[in-house]
């Protein structure tokens, strides 16, 4: 049995259950539908979903759409898809915060009636001035002592559209001298004459995040409202809203540190710029770390889950090396996916003593470490493609691949010995010649002699042409993400290399979008979901085989 220590959130939940604060666990992921989700959101999704699973509780997906903006709805579908792809099954528990506008309005009225909220006529600048600073207490607004009746009437007039944007706000009446600036009579409703995608023109007042969020949680009976550290000093306000609006049971906010990855771009502003400038081909460009991009690159939900678990949950900010994510996808695919042969930079190898026009079929295990993946038949013939750098005319020391006079193993096939080569006018090698030894067939038990090199190959007559895209980090790792002088991104000019003239073995007839494979010696690759066609395959390299990352 696995022994794992519990993270601090689980310890808190255990305590709450033990002390009877709650008798169930209900968590949520509350994205604002204003952009695509990225690896950081994946952490939040899997954390919240994982907690609900672990405690036999419920997980909600709630769109935090209280901010009326135009682009909102186009992201809802992509977010749902990403959450489902990650395996965070929210079932029927899909909610929209804008469905609670009536409840939020009633809560505001309740606060006014309790003398806990007032309509304030100060301008935004004045409100800021009155708020004070970290070292200086704030000053009470001259409108703070309006009567309940006046406040009710003014708030209703706000709702009825009698004021312009910014003319009046509703503020919580808490404490202008609080050491926590968030508690200095925060704004809880503002006037905004905007059409909302869900409620249309019904409202011209909208709740502020710090007021809306605890109500959303409370209405859904969320028990543990998990958010990131920047909300830590908003927690007193969260608790105040829940308490003063008299919700029972009260949800509890717990904060954890955001996930940061080194040398990747997650900021929406920067990604938008990269898309606009054509540096990446959209939000799902395989070099990005949006969930859509990771999926297109060939990452699996399992690999992301493993990654998030390895990162752990903590209260202190730190960044995680991208290499750890690569480690996780290698670990996940290693046993699961077939190992095939692909030649990325082809040159022809002719086996002079192999009969012309003849073909034999080799029985090849799809994954030597996992028998369950079965076998395939691989055609072998006189003409093969091999990698250009697997042959050298004048090899350096310790080069064990093909060179005149040297013998190597063709993977899954025979020993071949290089007997010559042809060049074009410029001296570039065009064809390598070899002879094979029939005695040395793989699996025949031949022990007569040994060779030091094994190279991969693809049979020419039935090779499938493919485009293969090789990626490096979008960011120049030496220089860091942002340029110190002007804040621009330090881009790596070699982040994408397109090889149009690659050949893969004839085993990809049924390959579908997102299918992934190991190409021996070259790494893990995935069928590109956007550009690949059955007769014109396009692969993304997910990751190379070797890693500097050690556990
Ligand atoms: P971004 O600006 O990067 O989109 P956000 O905070 O605006 O991030 P929201 O849609 O408001 O994104 O957040 C949805 C949830 O995801 C929140 O609970 C938030 O705390 C969480 N989240 C966002 N970024 C990260 C991150 N890097 N690591 C962990 N959780 C995150
Ligand atoms: Mg946000
Ligand atoms: Mg966001």
Image (cartoon, grey):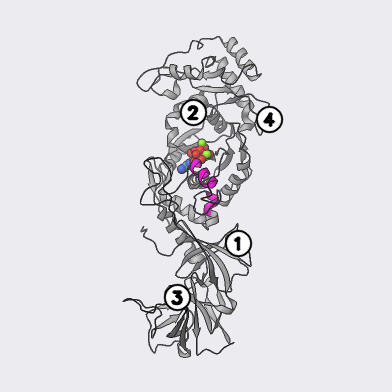
**Marks 2/3: CA distance?**
74 Å
Q: Residues within 10 Å of mark 1 (few under 14, many from 20)?
A: some
Label 1 close to label 3 by CB (< 8 Å): no
Q: Which residue is mark 2?
A: 238
Measured Cα–Cα span from mark 4 to mark 2: 28 Å
Q: Which residue is mark 1?
A: 532
Q: CA distance from mark 3 to mark 4?
A: 70 Å
Which quadrant: the N terminus? bottom left
The reply to whether dot 3 and dot 4 touch (C-beta < 8 Å) is no
Q: Earlier in the sequence, mark 2 or mark 1?
A: 2
SS class of the residue under badge 1? loop
Mark 4 neighbour density, 10 Å: few (under 14) some (14–19) many (20 or more): few
Q: Give the secondary structure at mark 4.
A: loop
| Tags 2 and 1 touching, CB below 8 Å | no
Q: Which residues are magenta?
A: 267-294
The picture places residue 156, in percent across and down from the top left corner, at 63, 16
Q: Which residue is mark 4?
A: 200
First of labels 1, 3 by sequence position: 3
Left or right? Give the position of 314 relative to 536. Answer: left
Q: Where in the figure is residue 8, as x and y percent of width and height? A: 40, 42
Which is closer to the viewer, label 3 or label 4? 3
């Amino acid at each position: 049995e696995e022994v794992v220590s519990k993270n601090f959130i689980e310890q808190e939940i255990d305590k709450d259950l033990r002390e009877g604060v709650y008798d169930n666990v209900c968590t949520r992921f509350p994205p604002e539908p204003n952009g695509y989700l990225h690896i950081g959101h994946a952490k939040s999704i899997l954390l919240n979903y994982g907690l609900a699973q672990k405690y036999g509780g419920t997980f909600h997906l709630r769109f935090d759409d209280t901010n009326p903006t135009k682009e909102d709805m186009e992201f809802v579908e992509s977010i749902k898809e990403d959450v489902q792809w990650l395996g965070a099954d929210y079932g029927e528990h899909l909610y929209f915060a804008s469905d609670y506008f009536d409840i939020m309005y009633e809560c505001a009225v309740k606060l006014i009636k309790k003398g806990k909220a007032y309509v304030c006529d100060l301008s935004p600048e004045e409100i800021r001035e009155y708020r004070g600073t970290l070292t200086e207490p704030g000053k009470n607004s001259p409108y703070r002592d309006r009567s309940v009746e006046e406040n009710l009437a003014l708030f209703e007039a706000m709702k009825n559209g009698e004021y312009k944007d910014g003319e009046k706000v509703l503020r919580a009446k808490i404490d202008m001298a609080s050491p926590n600036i968030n508690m200095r009579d925060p704004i809880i409703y503002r006037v905004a004459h905007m059409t909302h995608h869900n409620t249309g023109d019904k409202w011209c007042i909208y709740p502020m995040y710090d007021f809306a969020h605890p109500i959303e949680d409370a209405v859904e009976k969320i028990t543990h409202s998990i958010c990131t550290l920047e909300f830590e000093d908003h927690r007193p306000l969260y608790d105040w809203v829940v308490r003063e609006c008299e919700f029972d049971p009260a949800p509890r906010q717990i904060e954890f540190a955001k996930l940061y990855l080194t040398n990747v771009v997650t900021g929406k502003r920067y990604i938008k710029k990269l898309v606009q400038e054509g540096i990446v081909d959209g939000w799902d460009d395989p070099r990005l770390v949006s969930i859509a991009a990771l999926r297109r690159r060939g990452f699996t939900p399992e690999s992301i889950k493993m990654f998030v678990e390895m990162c752990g949950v903590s209260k202190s900010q730190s960044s995680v090396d991208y290499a750890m994510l690569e480690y996780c996808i290698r670990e996940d695919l290693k046993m699961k996916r077939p190992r095939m042969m692909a030649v990325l930079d082809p040159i022809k190898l002719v086996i002079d003593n192999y009969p012309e026009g003849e073909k034999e079929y080799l029985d090849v295990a799809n994954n030597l470490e996992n028998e369950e993946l079965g076998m395939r038949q691989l055609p072998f013939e006189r003409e093969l493609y091999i990698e250009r750098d697997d042959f050298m005319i004048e090899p350096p020391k310790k080069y064990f691949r093909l060179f005149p006079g040297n013998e190597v193993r063709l993977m899954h096939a025979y020993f071949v010995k290089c007997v010559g080569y042809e060049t074009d006018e410029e001296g570039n090698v065009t064809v390598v010649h070899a002879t094979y030894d029939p005695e040395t067939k793989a699996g025949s038990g031949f022990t007569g002699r040994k060779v030091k090199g094994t190279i991969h190959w693809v049979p020419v007559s039935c090779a499938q042409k493919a485009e293969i895209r090789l990626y490096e980090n979008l960011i120049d790792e030496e220089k860091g993400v942002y340029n110190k002088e002007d804040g621009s991104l330090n881009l790596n000019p070699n982040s994408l290399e397109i090889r149009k003239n690659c050949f893969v073995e004839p085993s990809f007839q049924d390959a579908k979008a997102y299918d992934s494979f190991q190409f021996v010696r070259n790494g893990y690759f995935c069928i590109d979901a956007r550009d690949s066609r059955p007769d014109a395959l396009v692969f993304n390299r997910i990751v190379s085989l070797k890693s500097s990352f050690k556990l």
